[in-house]
Image (cartoon, rainbow, N blue to C red):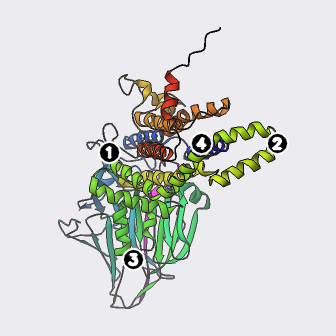
C-alpha cells in the first residue's frame, strides 16, 4: 500500500468515525424524532375532558421548600384551563396570550412568528400553558414570609385585581393589586417589550405597626416530562448561569434522580429550555439569591422547577419595599438573546443557546452566515458563500497539501522501482522512500489535511443548523423548504412520483429517505476520489469505490443544509485540486477514470 493511499484511507476512516459517532450519539435520526414529536403533540392536544391525565397540582411548590405530592384530578382541555380564571390579554408584535389574575401567573403565551410546520397555515407555537390543562408550563413571581413571620402573602390561588379593560402591550403596562386584609397591600406592575422580555416590579406597603420580613422569589414550573429529541449534542431541560457554579445544564432525567440542586448566586439567570424556545427568570444583576433546580412528584407525574429566593427584605411600619425581576419567554433568536445580555447586563445569557464545546467556532460561524444572509436573503446561499470564504482562508494550507499530493503522484514510478528493488526489506524501503520525500520536499501525511480541515467546520455547521432558530424552516430553493431538516425527497419513490412514503417502513425507514441532495453529495465525493489513480490493490479499490455510496446513505438523514455544504465543498475541492495538479505537471486522472467505467478495454485476440 502506497503512503498516498494509506493517508487517503486514514482520512476516510477518520471521517467515517466522526459520522458514525454522530449517528450513534444522536440516536434515531432527526426526521424520525420530529415525526414522533408531532404525533405526540397532536395526541396531547386532542386530550378531552374525562380522559386519563393529571393536573399535577394547580399551585406550584413554594420556593425553597420541597414540592408536595398531590392527587390527580381529571385533565382539562387548554380552553377549560384558561377559562377557570379571569385574565388580562397579552399582545405584542411577537407574542399573544394572557395573564391569569388568579395567582398572577404568566401562563398563556404563543409565538406569533413561528408555526409548527413549514406551512404558514399550521398552528403557531404554544410556549406557556396553564396548570390543569395539557402540558402546564408557566412563570410566577411573589413573596414568601421571612423566618418566624406569620403573614398572608399572595399565592397560586390569590385573586388579584386589575383596572377595567387592562391589556398588557409594549405601550400599556398592567398594575395588579391585592390586599391581604391584615395591613399589607401588594402591588405588581408588569410590562413587556416588543419581543419576549417581561419586567415584573413587586411592591408591598406595610400599614401595620410592626416590621415585616419578606423574601422575593420567582419560578418557572413545568408539569410532566416533555418529549425531547434526545440528541447527545443538544441540551433540553433545566438551564441557568449562577455566579458560583457557572453554566448549569441539567437533563430532566438527572434532576428527576437528584431531585434538588441549590446554588448561591449574585445575579445570573435560570429556567427551562427546549430546542428553540425557553422560559427563564432573571433577578437583578447585583441581587443575592439562592438558585434552585428541582423535581418533585405531583400525582402521576413529575413537576420540574427552577426558582430563586432572594434575601429577606424588611418593610418598616408605614414604609414600602420593592423588588423587580425579568422573565424571558420566547424564541431563542441569537440577535435578541445577545441584545438582552448587553442591555440588562445578564451574565452569559448567550449560553441559553446551546453553542456546545466548540463555542469559539460555532457562534462566529453562525454570525458570519447570518451577516451574509442579510445581503443575499437566503441562508442556503449564505452557506455556499461561507464555504467559498473558508476555502479562501485555508487556501495556503490546502494548496500546500494538494501540491504535496501532486508531487507524490509524480514520484510514483520511482517508488514502484524501489519496491521491486528492495522487495521484502521494509526498513531499507522506508529509508529510501523518505530520502525521496525529503529530496522532493514532500509531506507524506499531506493527503489527510484537506479532510481534517473539514471536520471542525463540519461539526460547527452541523451545530449551527441544528440549534439556531434562524435555520428552522429556512428555505433554500426548490423542494428544500427547511435547511435544518433532511432532504424530504427519496429515490425509493422516484422523488414523489410514486404515492408511497418509505419512511413508514419499520426500522429501516429512515435509511430509505435518500434524497436528491444526498445523491448529489455522493456524486461529488465520488468525483473527488476519481481524481486519483485507481489503487492497484483490489481491497483498496473496493473501499474507494464503495465509500461515496456509504457516505451518501449516512448523510441522507442529516440536515439538508449540511449536505448542501458538503456537496459544494467537494465540488470546490475537485476544481482546486485539478488546477494544482495541472500546475505541478501531474495528469488529472478524473476523466480517464470516468471513461474507464463506461469504456471496456478490448482484449487482444489470441494469435
Residue at 46% from the left image edge and 32% from the top image edge:
514
Is residue 176 rendered magenta in the image?
no
Q: Which residue is mark 4?
A: 409
**Element under label 4?**
helix
Q: Nearer the viewer, mark 3 or mark 2?
A: 2
The first of marks 4 and 3 along the sequence is: 3
Say which residue label 2 marks. Answer: 425
Which residue shows up at 77% across the image and 45% down it?
429
Q: Quadrant of the C terminus?
A: top right
**Mark 2 or mark 4: whose residue is earlier in sequence:** 4
- What's the CA distance linking mark 1 and mark 4? 42 Å
Q: Quarter-wise, where is residue 521 in the image?
A: top left
Disc 1 crowd rating (10 Å Cα; few below 14, some 14-19, many 20+) is some
Q: CA distance from mark 2 to mark 4?
A: 23 Å
Quarter of the image with the N terminus in it = top right
Q: Kindly indicate whether the residue at mark 3 contacts the one at mark 4 (C-beta within 8 angstroms).
A: no
Q: Is residue 512 left or right of residue 170?
A: right
First to last magenta residue range? 207-235
Callouts 2 and 1 close, C-beta under 8 Å: no
**Closer mark to the observer between disc 4 and disc 3:** 4
Looking at this rendering, what residue extends furthest in the left direction? 165
Q: Earlier in the sequence, mark 1 or mark 4?
A: 4
Amino acid at each position: 500500500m502506497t503512503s498516498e493511499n494509506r493517508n487517503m484511507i486514514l482520512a476516510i476512516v477518520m471521517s467515517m468515525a466522526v459520522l458514525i459517532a454522530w449517528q450513534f450519539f444522536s440516536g434515531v435520526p432527526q426526521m424520525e424524532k420530529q415525526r414522533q414529536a408531532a404525533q405526540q403533540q397532536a395526541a396531547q392536544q386532542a386530550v378531552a375532558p374525562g380522559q386519563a391525565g393529571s393536573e399535577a397540582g394547580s399551585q406550584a411548590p413554594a420556593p425553597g421548600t420541597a414540592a408536595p405530592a398531590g392527587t390527580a384530578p381529571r385533565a382539562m382541555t387548554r380552553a377549560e384551563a384558561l377559562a377557570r380564571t379571569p385574565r388580562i390579554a397579552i399582545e405584542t408584535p411577537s407574542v399573544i396570550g394572557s395573564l391569569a389574575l388568579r395567582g398572577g401567573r404568566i401562563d398563556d403565551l404563543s409565538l406569533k412568528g413561528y408555526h409548527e410546520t413549514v406551512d404558514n397555515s399550521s398552528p403557531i407555537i404554544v410556549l406557556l400553558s396553564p396548570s390543569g390543562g395539557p402540558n402546564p408550563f408557566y412563570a410566577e413571581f411573589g413573596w414568601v414570609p421571612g423566618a418566624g413571620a406569620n403573614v398572608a402573602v399572595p399565592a397560586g390561588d390569590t385573586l388579584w385585581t386589575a383596572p377595567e379593560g387592562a391589556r398588557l402591550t409594549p405601550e400599556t403596562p398592567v398594575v395588579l393589586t391585592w390586599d391581604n386584609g391584615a395591613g399589607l397591600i401588594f402591588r405588581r406592575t408588569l410590562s413587556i417589550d416588543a419581543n419576549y422580555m417581561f419586567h415584573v416590579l413587586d411592591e408591598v406597603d406595610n400599614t401595620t405597626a410592626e416590621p415585616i420580613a419578606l423574601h422575593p422569589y420567582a419560578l418557572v414550573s413545568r408539569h410532566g416530562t416533555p418529549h425531547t429529541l434526545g440528541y447527545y449534542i443538544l441540551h433540553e431541560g433545566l438551564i441557568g448561569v449562577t455566579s458560583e457554579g457557572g453554566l448549569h445544564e441539567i437533563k430532566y432525567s438527572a434532576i428527576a434522580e437528584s431531585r434538588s440542586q441549590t446554588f448561591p448566586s449574585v445575579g445570573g439567570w435560570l429556567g427551562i429550555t427546549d430546542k428553540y424556545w425557553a422560559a427563564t427568570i432573571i433577578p437583578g444583576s447585583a441581587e443575592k439569591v439562592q438558585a434552585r433546580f428541582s423535581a418533585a412528584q405531583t400525582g402521576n407525574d413529575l413537576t420540574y422547577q427552577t426558582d430563586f429566593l432572594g434575601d429577606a427584605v424588611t418593610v418598616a411600619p408605614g414604609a414600602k419595599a420593592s423588588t423587580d425581576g425579568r422573565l424571558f419567554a420566547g424564541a431563542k433568536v441569537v440577535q435578541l438573546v445577545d441584545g438582552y445580555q448587553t442591555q440588562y447586563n445578564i451574565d452569559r445569557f448567550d449560553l441559553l443557546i446551546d453553542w456546545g464545546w466548540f463555542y469559539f467556532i460555532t457562534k462566529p460561524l453562525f454570525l458570519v452566515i447570518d451577516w451574509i444572509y442579510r445581503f443575499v436573503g437566503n441562508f442556503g446561499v449564505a452557506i455556499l458563500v461561507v464555504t467559498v470564504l473558508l476555502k479562501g482562508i485555508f487556501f495556503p494550507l490546502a494548496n500546500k497539501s494538494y501540491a504535496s499530493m501532486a508531487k507524490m503522484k509524480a514520484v510514483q514510478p520511482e517508488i514502484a522501482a524501489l519496491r521491486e528493488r528492495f522487495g521484502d526489506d521494509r526498513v531499507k524501503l522506508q529509508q529510501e522512500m523518505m530520502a525521496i520525500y525529503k529530496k522532493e520536499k514532500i509531506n507524506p501525511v499531506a493527503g489527510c489535511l484537506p479532510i481534517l480541515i473539514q471536520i471542525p467546520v463540519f461539526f460547527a455547521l452541523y451545530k449551527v443548523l441544528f440549534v439556531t432558530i434562524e435555520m428552522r424552516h429556512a428555505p433554500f430553493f426548490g423542494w428544500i423548504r427547511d435547511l435544518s431538516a433532511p432532504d424530504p425527497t427519496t429515490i425509493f419513490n422516484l422523488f414523489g412520483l410514486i404515492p408511497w412514503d418509505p419512511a413508514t417502513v419499520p426500522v429501516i425507514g429512515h435509511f430509505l429517505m435518500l434524497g436528491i441532495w444526498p445523491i448529489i453529495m455522493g456524486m461529488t465525493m465520488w468525483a473527488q476520489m476519481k481524481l486519483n489513480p485507481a489503487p492497484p490493490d483490489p481491497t483498496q479499490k473496493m473501499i474507494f469505490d464503495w465509500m461515496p455510496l456509504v457516505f451518501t446513505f449516512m448523510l441522507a438523514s442529516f440536515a439538508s443544509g449540511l449536505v448542501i455544504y458538503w456537496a459544494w465543498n467537494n465540488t470546490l475541492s475537485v476544481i482546486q485540486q485539478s488546477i494544482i495538479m495541472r500546475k505541478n505537471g501531474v495528469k488529472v486522472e478524473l476523466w480517464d477514470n470516468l471513461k474507464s467505467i463506461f469504456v471496456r478495454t478490448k482484449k487482444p485476440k489470441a494469435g
